[in-house]
Amino acid sequence: MSNYLNCKKGLFSWLFTRDHKRIALLYMITVFSFFIVGGFFALLIRLELFKVGETIVNSAFYNQLMTYHGAVMIFMVIIPGIPAFLGNFVLPLQIGAKDVAFPTVNLLSWYCLVIGAFVTLTSLFLGGVDTGWTFYTPYSIETGTAVIPVVLGAFIMGFSSILTGLNFIVTIHQLRAPGMSFFKMPLFVWSLYSTAIIQVLATPVLAITLLLLVAERVLKVGVFDPAMGGDPILFQHFFWFYSHPAVYIMILPAMGVISELICAFSRKRIFGYKALVFASLGIAVVSFFVWGHHMYVSGQSEWAGIVFSVLTMLVGVPTAVKIFNWIATMFRGSLKFDTPFLYALGFLFLFLIGGVTGYMLAVLPFDVHVHDTYFVVAHFHYVMVGGSIMGIMGGFYYWFPKMFGRLYNEGMGQLGFALIFIGFNVTFFPQFILGINGMPRRYADYKAPYEALNQISTVGSWLIALGFIVAFTFLLWAMFKGRKASANPWGAKTLEWQSSSPPPHENFLETPVVTKEAYE
Amino acid sequence: MTDYVARLEKLEHFLIGISFLVCVLIVIVFVYFSFRYKRKRDDEKLEESSHHNTILEFTWSFIPFVIFMGSFVWGWILYSDFRREAPRDSLEIHVYGQKWNWEFVYKNGRKTSNELFVPVKRSVKLIMTSRDVIHSFYIPTFKIKQDVLPGLYTSLWFKANRKGRFEVFCTEFCGTGHSTMGAKLKVMSLEDWNNWLKTDPYKNLSLVEVGQKVFQGRCTACHNSTKEKLIGPGLAGIYNTQRELEGGMTLLADENYLRESILNPSAKISKGYANQMTPFAGLLSEEELSGLIEYIKSLN
Amino acid sequence: MSIDNSSFKTNLSVLIALLILTVITVLVAQVDFGIFNAFFAMLIAGIKGALVLMYFMHLKYDEKIYSLIFGISVFFVFVLYFFSKLDIITRIIQTSVL
Amino acid sequence: MKDNKNLAHHFNSYKDQIRAEKIGMWLFLATEILMFGGLFVGYTIYHAEYTKVFKVGAEFLNWKKGAINTVVLLFSSWTMVMSIYYAQKDQIKKCQMMLGTTLVCGFLFMFIKYLEYSHKFHEGIFPGIYFSYTGSAFVEDLPLYFSFYYLMTGLHASHVFIGMALIFWMLIKTYKKQINSSHYMPLEYVGLFWHLVDLIWIFLFPLLYLVE
């Protein structure tokens, strides 16, 4: 039967495709490739930190490793990860559309990502960059390393993000199937909508900030340079105006995936649909008012700190609501513990820890103590890896049969999950303790008392690596050799499962008409 | 350590306690659900259950809200205590951050690097600024931290309750030597401190010994006293040899070259090194400078 | 189509209004109103901007969603301004007593 | 309208497609506003901090040239609107004339900008570290004002340039007979972009040239 995978052949039919499903797979290849690159940097970082003193790399190189790990993972993996890869594939299917609103723009957005990533990585051959992914001035103005290609690369990748977001908003507004009102849309679509709002509104400010930074390096314009009357704290305001909402670009779509997974594997309607919708939108909007909580000790004024602290607490409420609603959905359900659902439960557990530590960090004096220590590192990874990466993996396993028309190996999927989940906790939980004990982040070397916990952490990183090797190997195998999947192997209710696996070129042979509520 | 730490620890215990409690409760619930509602047969029928409950949803939004706001207020009280102006009788010490060491300047003109001496049971106010990029002054034991910015004073104050030696870290990423940019805080009795303040650090020292002292305080983050390269070149055997510069020029490393490389390092960069040393112009006395040069010469 | 509403005459009068307002801005700048200088300059620029948006960019005739998008973007510029300014004002108050 | 050749395969009707494109265009304009917004916010904050310096800086600028440029851009906005007006009426000749005038206005704007820049360069007023003006009116931190001047007008000028390229493209489209009363939307979108460039200038002009 003709489907989107086999309807056209040849490399160019992929590189110039305007089919959202094929573009999603292009994203899949890019995102996972960069994930491996970023993961490799992470393993080197952990290896260096295994022992006190300089072991495998010197501090200059270590600083580059941590910069590239951050930049690659954030700009090239997590930000495009769920929206551009899973979202691209699933969004039109879930709303019963033939494609996204602007297929060419969609392809352009992928090219922006690839070109931006390429520009960023050319800096590797120009001596590398060592500013950290936050590019704080004035260090980023003064350092002799290749800041400009990295910044320009991030600028171009920003366009990728903007275009994806723009495309999704329009698609959701204009291309819903007949009968699908806004409040009948699946929650994944809602979460992509909230994400897209942030992408469109926040990314331009990053763009101008990065342009200013380039101007700062080329011309020394002095806007952020105290030597010329500029204010370095203003850079941090501008930067976090984007970068705080950006962490919600990373986590909101993962939350959407989890909603899908929990419904599908509990065989139930979601509990509190509207609450979850408004929680997503609420998080998206409030995320713009809280960026200063990254700056409690930056020299920002006391009052600004207090205002940002109370606003940050407000984000906690919709987040808590989401967790409670997911668990309430499981109540009296019929739970099947397939790999995607295990990832969803893994998400719940890790995100819970990431969430409560986030609440702790919002409390001013506690943050003053642990700011820029491993506590923050651990919190961030619990939210981003425990949240976003669990979301990507869970979603990938869940929609895998739809994407390739084949089933993955359940046993190996579960083994991969177990290794990643255990490895993750072994790696990052000790870092909370390190942080409370005052070990600063971005340290190429540390004092002897911190050694034992660092060693546990490094061992954990090997477990994670092993887990991903297992997961990816068997997924790759299943892509070509897995058993054939039926149209709806999970018994899920959303529209994408009404189409065949893999779907035909224009998604549905007949445009679906929606009469039921979401997940009914 | 300090009164502030004692009060902050109460808040920490509350935060960790309530977070732990909430996590445990939620995990128990969803693990219980996982076992209780596990799918037994593929075609099992579900009991009818509601998918919406306003009162329940309001409750579990409202309770976290109250906890969050309570924590915020508690935090606010402590934070304004931490940020409030130091007591009027505080001992004031100027702190300068630079890549990659800390310099402390006391009221009587005494300077130390990477070692901060303060008397016990006396509030101390640090007036801090940076000579190059942003640093952050962090005393983990006292749980206080403040970024140190160029072109702006920030301050931090504390009152140590007992004597001892404590670590100071730089926690804002500041470049290659970031992780070595630490200092020791020494809390001593008032009497000892007053005596210490009056001592002349260079009394009865030869010029080379003065240089060695300066070297150990200011230079070791980047330079070794052997030939081994750290961030900057190792200084043994440099004097009176030909140095190859960036751009291909070579010149003899005489006293003038050494002097210039200390005071204005970016003028001539050795081949293979980045231009990242903060200039010492105005930061060293003539005696210290001559001492340093003599010390470098003595390493040959 | 909605654009048909904007006739030749309306467009021309909008242009003339814009040009007159430009002259007024320049004239107002010559007079000193003290602290109101910036206020008047921005007020006139605001009126001009509104004219361009409403008539040249058809926001007056089009669906409300386009105005909404525009409004939201301006709102978030103000958010950026508000919080950055909040920090800087209160910082100056604080550092002056340091 | 089902068999309109401009209808993309995944839309149900041409009307749906236009609405989608317009929302997309406005979202794009929103990103532009936020991008310029960053600069405006920076400018406003430093203006409050260095009021006197900025006043001295503004006196360097020739407000007459700024005012002429404002008039040029406003006029070009009007011709842009009129070109759409004529396209809707299928009066393609007039439409082309109006587009051509818009393009000429763009060139005029850029030319005056060039005169202004070269005058500044002549005085040694370059951006950033290249600033070498040492005349009598120099005050400390003056380079900061001109950093903003060059960044804001430079970014704006680059948008004028992009707008001109788009208008030129539209002109070609009219000659290829791809613009007519049933399909004039590309013209409309270029128009929106051009008006936004105008809109930004409306605010830049008093901020940079007339500040006190």
Image (spheres, coloured by chain):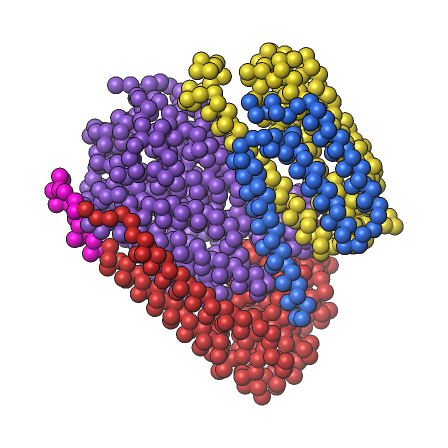
Magenta stretch encompasses residue B34: yes
Q: Is residue B67 left or right of residue B248?
A: left
Task: Please tell me whether residue A224 belongs to the stretch shown in magenta.
Answer: no
Q: Is residue D176 left or right of residue A476?
A: right
Chain A appears in which tint? Answer: purple
Q: Residue at x 37, y 39 (%)?
A: A183
In which quarter of the view is residue B9 placed?
A: bottom left
Report the magenta residues as a range.
B31-47
Q: Viewer-proximal residue, B126 or D179?
A: D179
The chain coloured blue is: C
Q: Is residue B105 above or below residue D149?
A: below
Front residue of this view, candidates A317 and A419: A317
**Residue A179, percent across and down?**
35, 31
Can residue B50 be seen at all in this image of the molecule? Answer: yes
The chain painted yellow is: D
Chain B appears in which tint? red
